């Protein structure tokens, strides 16, 4: 089981979570929007500001993982995009993590460029169906 703490206001992030949720037939993922009203009460050990800067996840044993470790594990758990595990190979990992940090920092601008929306309007209005 992997709990993913994601930015529900980011259209790209929300879309990826919807896709993961639809593929999670074995119920191995728990998706938690860091902008949910009760987030800090439910997860006081997760700093939503830090989780907004870089994707956070929590393993069943309580260990916190971040960034591409979360993304790659999530896709592995739903048994899709097996090629992504290459991003965790030692030499590639360093460069992939640097690229991911740039993506994470500018994801709203990237989303605006790709989708035309920097923020998920439905999620901001608490009407997201995720």
Image (cartoon, grey):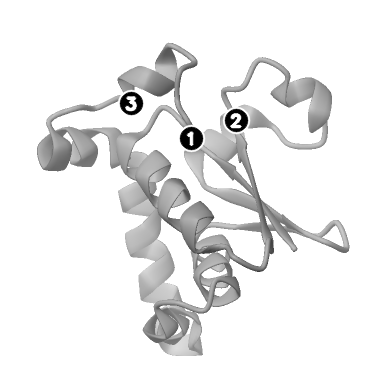
Residue at the (38%, 85%) spot, across then down: 83
The answer to whether residue 4 shows anywhere in this view is: yes
**Can you tell which mark lies on residue 7?**
1
Q: Nearer the viewer, residue 29 or 108?
A: 29
Q: Which residue is mark 2?
A: 34
Q: Nearer the viewer, residue 4 or 129?
A: 129
Circle 3 packing at 10 Å, graded few (<14), some (14-19), many (20+), is many
User: Up-down: is 102 above or below 88?
Assistant: above
**Can you tell which mark lies on residue 120?**
3
Secondary structure of the residue carrying tag 2 is loop
**Can you tell which mark lies on residue 23?**
none
- Distance in Å between CA atoms under marks 3 and 2: 14 Å
Residue at the (54%, 76%) spot, across then down: 76
Q: Nearer the viewer, residue 43 or 97?
A: 43
- Distance in Å between CA atoms under marks 3 and 1: 10 Å
The image position of residue 91, as x and y in percent, is 43, 87
Assess whether mark 2 and mark 1 are in contact (beta carbons under 8 angstroms).
yes
């Amino acid at each position: 089981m992997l709990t993913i703490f994601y930015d529900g206001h980011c259209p790209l992030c929300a879309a990826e979570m919807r896709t993961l949720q639809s593929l999670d037939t074995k119920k191995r993922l728990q998706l938690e929007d860091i902008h949910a009203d009760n987030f800090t009460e439910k997860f006081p050990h997760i700093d939503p500001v830090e989780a907004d800067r870089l994707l956070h996840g929590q393993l069943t044993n309580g260990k916190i993982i971040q960034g591409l470790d979360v993304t790659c594990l999530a896709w592995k758990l739903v048994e899709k995009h097996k090629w992504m595990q290459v991003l965790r190979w030692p030499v590639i990992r360093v460069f992939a993590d640097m690229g991911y940090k740039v993506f994470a920092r500018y994801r709203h601008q990237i989303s605006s460029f790709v989708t035309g929306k920097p923020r998920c309007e439905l999620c901001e209005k608490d009407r997201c169906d995720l």
